[in-house]
Image: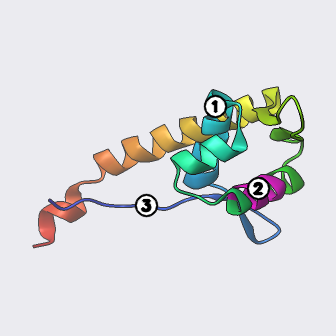
Amino acid sequence: MKKIKFKYWVENEGEKFYGPGPNELVKRIHKEGSLSRAAAQMNMSYKKAWDLVQRLNKHAAEPLVILKKGGSHGGGAEITPYALKVIREYEKLEQKVNELLEQENDLLKIIK
């Protein structure tokens, strides 16, 4: 089955900043309350997830994820209200792009 694919992300200062992977990680952190569990669910190393969160927080207008240090009571992670807004807006964009791609089938009709 032929399908038009489109990749998009947000850049800041020429660096990829927010896209499908970061969006999924932030959503999983929200659900799990843990960076390590969120990373494991995505088959991502903790180090890669940690680096991604640091990059997100650096390039966003406000922090997206708050990491809590471990210890006797354990650590954890939580997302900020700002992160919820970013998720919501990113998913609105995602929906618009998908709707546009569904409408643009003329190219698929002429490609054999």
Can residue 67 be spotted in the picture? yes
**Main secondary-structure element of the magenta-colored stretch:** helix
Quarter that holds the N terminus: bottom left
- The residue where tag 3 is placed is 6
Return the residue nearer the eye: 112 or 83: 83
Location of mark 1 (residue): 32
Residues packed near mark 3 inside 10 Å, few (<14), some (14 to 19) or many (20 plus): few
98 vs 81, left or right, is left
Earlier along the polypeptide chain: callout 3 or callout 1?
A: 3
Give, as a three-letter code, the residue at label 1: Glu
> What residue lies at 55% left-to-right and 35% top-to-bottom?
92
Label 3 or label 1, whichever lies nearer to me, is 1
Q: In this view, does 49 lie above or below 32?
A: below
Mark 2 or 3: in front is: 2
Asked which secondary structure carries label 1, the reply is: helix
SS category of the residue bearing label 2: helix
State the image quarter where residue 33 is shown: top right
Q: Give the range drawn in magenta.
A: 49-55
Q: Distance between the residues labelled 2 and 3?
A: 27 Å
Indicate the position of residue 27 as horizontal and vertical percent values: 62, 36
Q: Where is residue 105 in the image (x, y as percent from the top left)?
A: 23, 54
Residue 60 in the figure: left or right of residue 33:
right
> Would you name the residue on which mark 2 appears?
50
- The disc labelled 3 sits on which kind of residue? Phe
Label 1 crowd bin: few (<14), some (14–19), many (20+), radius 10 Å: some
